[in-house]
Image (cartoon, rainbow, N blue to C red):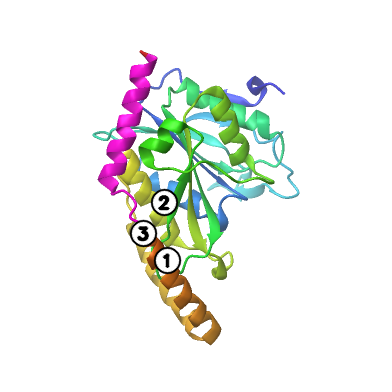
Amino acid sequence: MNTADVLSTFFDDVAPLNRPIMVVALRGWFDIAEVATSAIDELLVDRIAPVVASIDPDPFFDFTQERPFVELDDDETRHIVWPANDFQFARFPGSPHDLVVLVGVEPHLRYATFAECVLQVAEASKCEVVVTVGAVADTVPHTRAPLVVGSTTNGALQRALGLSTPRYQGITGLVGVLQERLDRAGMPAVSLRVGVPHYLGNAHHPQSSIALLQHLHHVLGVPVHTDRLADDAQRRRVLHDEAVAEDEQATAYVAMLEREYDQKAEAAIPSGEDLAADFERFLRDQRDDEE
């Protein structure tokens, strides 16, 4: 299948972005409790962010798993709403970067074609880096700020930001395929993932969404607003505290996780200012090499 058959772009009448970064969050296997997609949705609240490209859902989904749904508009006209994968331009005046944002749904089929669509939009919009964000179940206590970790195959980015090299082997989802495709194309790419307390099951955990947003703010310099998420996080913290307190084993387990977390936190990660400076230095070096 050719990407021209499934990718529609609307760049012609849109002004270029300021040193854009692409941020990708897809609901699915790499987004426990929809933490990542909720975070990036919040990033776009009250911001004009026109759709500049769209991937046709029809070839990519098993609609017995990701079913479309029916909506009635104000005139009670019926519409079918399909799973959407739309790219938006988000401008941040005064910030180092504008963003190209894809908040969508992980496809079931044709991963290679879908990844090629993402790469084409990144190249057409002149993105300097592609950042995928996700959420995974982790042994992190709900009483502490969730940790955000990152990895990249780009040696310069590893050195600049202290990121790890991906070591995972096994089955993967669209994010794994996309990272490999970006790497082969020479497009710098970073995978960020935040931990979600595994003992909460699939319960919504806004504190993890806040951690992702704050990390993006530190590194990319874009403003984030977390007030609504913070209110929700406070309410859920009370509920989670009460649920743990009712079980002695759960209480002891969380106390153990807290001790382990505090030990890890002592291995100081760079400050937000240091991360941003190192990231900008990497991008500056990249531009110098191209010139």
**Which residues are the magenta region?**
267-290
Query: Where, by quadrant of the figure, is residue 3 drawn?
Result: top right
The CA distance from mark 3 to mark 2 is 15 Å
Q: Nearer the viewer, residue 269 or 75?
A: 269
The CA distance from mark 2 to mark 1 is 18 Å
- Residue 47 position within the rendered picture, expressed as x and y whole percent measured from the top left: 35, 41
> Hey, what amino acid is under mark 2?
Leu
The residue pinned by badge 1 equals 261
- Crowd band around label 2 with a 10 angstrom C-alpha radius: few (<14), some (14–19), many (20+): many
- Residue 38 position within the rendered picture, expressed as x and y whole percent measured from the top left: 47, 52
Please name the residue shown 40% across and 22% down the image. 14
Residue 98 in the figure: left or right of residue 67 = left
Q: Nearer the viewer, residue 247 or 168?
A: 168
Q: Earlier in the sequence, mark 1 or mark 3?
A: 3
> Hey, what amino acid is under mark 3?
Arg
- Crowd band around label 3 with a 10 angstrom C-alpha radius: few (<14), some (14–19), many (20+): few
In the rendered structure, find residue 212 and report the number of the disc placed on it: 2
